Structure formats: C-alpha cells, structure tokens
Amino acid sequence: MNSTDDPRSATYWFLTGMRGIFSMPALILMTSFVGFAAFALESGLTRSEAMFMTIMIWALPAKMILTGMLASGAHILAIFVAVSLSSIRMMPMVASLVPELKTPRTPVWLLLFLSHFIAITAWVFTTQTIDRVPREHRTAYFGGFGMTLTLTNTLLVGICYGLVATFPPMVAGALFMLTPVYFVASIWATSRQPVLKLAFVIGIMGGPLLALVAPGFDVLVAGIGGGTLAYVIDRFLLSPRRAQSLDKGQRL
C-alpha cells in the first residue's frame, strides 16, 4: 500500500494496532499468561515480581525458564545462560520484521524500543496483517499492538495472581498449553517457503529423540540442526528439482 494514497494518520493506525488485542493470537496468549500467573504463585514469586518479569522479559518461554530455575535454586550464571539461549530465537523474528516496519526516516531508537515487543505472538500477528498498513505508519501499527499486548498481559498477571490459587491444576495447565499448540499451528500456516516447513518437520521429529540423547540441549540442537539439515536438503536436492520442473514447464 502506498502511504501517499492513504489519508489516515499514525494515530489511526496505532489505534488499529491496539484493536489487535481482540485477535485470536492475542486472546490465546492471554489465557497462557493466566497459566503463568499460576506457575509464578506456585514457584514462590510475589505478585510484583511476576508483573515485573512480564513487562521486562515479555517472552513467555524465557519467563518460564527463569521462574523454574529460580525455584530449583539454580546458580545465577546458569540461569543467565539458559534465559539468553532461549531468547536467541527472537533474533530471526526481529531480523525479518524490522525491515518491514522501517522507512529511511525511522529513527534507530524507535526500532530498538519496538524490538522489545517482538515475540512469536506479535510476530505472527504482524506478519499476517502488515501488508495492509502503509509503510510509514507500520511502526505506529506495531507499537499499538505490541505495547497493548504487553501491558494487558502484565495487568492480567497481577489480577489473576491470587485468583489462580482456586483453579484446579489441570485447568491452569490446560490454559498454559494453549500457547504452544497455537504457536505450532501458526508457524506452519505462516511458513511461505517449502524449506521452512521442512525445517519445522525435522525439528518436530528430532526433538523427542534428542530429549533422550541430549537432555538439556534437545531444543537447541533440534533447532540449529533441523534448520541446517533442511537448508542442505533444499539447496542440493529440492531446489535443482524445482528448477528442472520450471525449465520443462517453460519449454512446453
């Protein structure tokens, strides 16, 4: 969309992004944060600590790792390394989304600020909807969604912190598990290239096996190894076949 043909202001697109809080990705994430509130309570975190973790760390898996390791009495250095490794997966999301948001006039500080709100829910939602937003208003659109999503879940954790004590453990666990189920479906649906789906399948199949062979490193090895193997297969086996098929089609 050409921004010069769109009369709507940045405020309009910021409010449009805020309305994304009622989307299915956001609603499912909110139910998962109810599960996190239960986990934080059981792990001995205070309400203020759980809320601080939500707004500052934001990514749910990193918070779960931090909370679990704190509860187990792990060394602070081990916790730092584990949370850092968990957060590395955000790098490709930031690298793929920031070019879609910025313009030549977008200040670097704004992109750095907005990158804090890039996690898989924000990435999936924005990837699916960003094409409908004029480029010069995309930072406002993403800011509206990302900031609203983060603040809403922070407040939700604070509100539900005491309430979840009355939930049956099965209910709290089911709420928390909605997010990984949705993530799996969303990643598959938004994979536009065959190599991405191939890497996904290899990672899913290799994860359980690596959990037995290399516990503690299974996710890291499955992610890096699965992606590398998928690239090799696509580069040297599938791409030549696609090129041959395209060449034959052109000849016909």
Image (tube, rainbow, N blue to C red):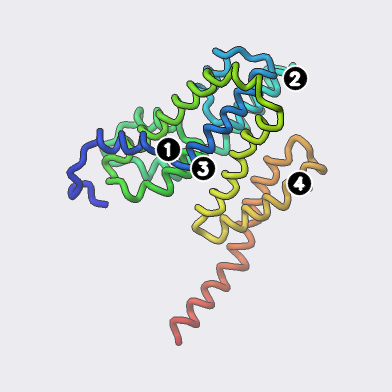
Q: Residues under labels 1 and 2: Cα distance?
A: 36 Å
Q: Are marks 2 and 4 in contact (CB under 8 Å)?
A: no
Image quadrant holding the C terminus, namely bottom left
Q: Pointer 1 and pointer 2: residues touching (CB < 8 Å)?
A: no
- Single out the mark in the foreground, 3 or 2: 2
Q: Which residue is mark 2?
A: 72
Nearer the observer, disc 3 or disc 4? 4
Q: Residue at x 45, y 45 (%)?
A: 96
| Residue in view at x 63 percent, y 32 percent | 85
Q: Identify the mark nearer the N-term, 4 or 1.
A: 1
Where in the figure is residue 179, as x and y percent of width and height? 59, 39
- Return the x and y of residue 200 as percentages of the image width and height: 62, 52
**Upstream in the sequence, badge 3 or badge 2?**
2
- Image side of residue 91 versus residue 148, left or right: right
Distance Cα–Cα, label 2 vs label 4? 24 Å
Q: Nearer the viewer, mark 3 or mark 1?
A: 1
Q: As shown in the figure, which amino acid type bears the numbered disc 1?
A: Phe
Q: Label 2: state its secondary structure.
A: helix
Q: CA distance from mark 3 to mark 4?
A: 24 Å
- The kind of residue tagged 4 is Pro
Residue at position x 48%, y 42% from top? 24
Q: From the image, tell me which residue sits under label 3.
A: 92
The image quarter containing residue 18 is: top left
Name the mark on residue 208. 4
Crowd class of label 2 (few under 14; some 14 to 19; many from 20; radius 10 Å): few
Position of residue 238 relative to residue 224, above or below, is below
